[in-house]
Image: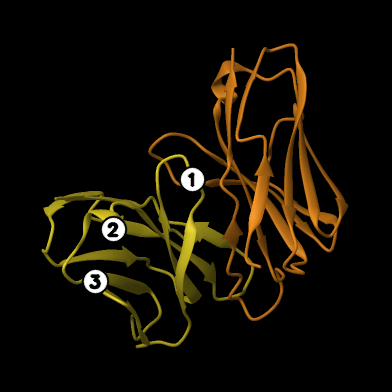
Chain colours: A yellow, B orange
Amino acid sequence: TQLLEQSPQFLSIQEGENLTVYCNSSSVFSSLQWYRQEPGEGPVLLVTVVTGGEVKKLKRLTFQFGDARKDSSLHITAAQPGDTGLYLCAGVDNYGQNFVFGPGTRLSVLP
Amino acid sequence: DTEVTQTPKHLVMGMTNKKSLKCEQHMGHRAMYWYKQKAKKPPELMFVYSYEKLSINESVPSRFSPECPNSSLLNLHLHALQPEDSALYLCASSQGIQTSGRREQYFGPGTRLTVT
């Protein structure tokens, strides 16, 4: 069973600060996705990374897939209160069979 | 259109009731999913339909009964639920489950279910 771990579990920062959250596994994933979920709503897909070493930017969010395709990071520059939410990474194993979610990082950006 | 819709938004039901949750997508996706999410936890996969056939059942109790009438619709029939079944029930869809391993899923807003 492929497991995804995320760190930190909780993060509370002030508006304007930078932050990085991590998604790690001991297994290789064919792709990893990042979602943001607000309370009472469904997760919203932010990005998919597929190639080892890949970097994708989405406005103030930068996503990186590790060279070995076992880990990923999400960096937010100049965080805003609207970034508050649960950030979930999810991945498909290298056989394309199993899709798993990490436990999530709960981010709170204070004005 | 990248929207997945779910109805109802909220549902309160007694343990003897029968109710159904509905999900609809018009993205031409051929895979649809039901997830259960408890507070402060990630979504847990319940069922996967691929090309309108049940592909995965993650050992879900029989009081939950999925149905896929066509490629755009997914239902979850509920009967004799327990209070511990109270959760956010999420529907999602993706292009497929076999192709390229990407399997990006698009989620609906969920149905908040309370069992009394």
Residue at numbered disc 1: A41
Image coordinates of residue A21 in percent, x first then y, are: 25, 63
**Same subunit: marks 3 and 2:** yes
Q: Mark 1 or 2 closer to N-term?
A: 1
Category of crowding for the residue at label 3, using alpha-carbon neighbours closer than 10 angstroms: few (below 14), some (14–19), many (at least 20): some
Q: Which of these two is toward me, A20 or A98? A: A20
The numbered mark, 3 or 2, whose residue comes first in the sequence reads 3
What whole-number distance in Å separates the C-alpha atoms at marks 1 and 2? 14 Å
Disc 1 element:
loop
Residue A1 appears anywhere in the view: no
Residue A55 sits in quarter: bottom left
Please name which of the two marks, 3 or 2, marks the residue nearer to the observer. 2
| Residue A111 sits above or below residue B88 on the image | below
**Local secondary structure at mark 2:** helix
Name the residue at 19% across, 72% down. A77
Dot 2 corresponds to which residue? A83
| Residue under numbered circle 3 | A75
* Amino acid type, label 2: Asp
Q: Nearer the viewer, mark 3 or mark 1?
A: 1
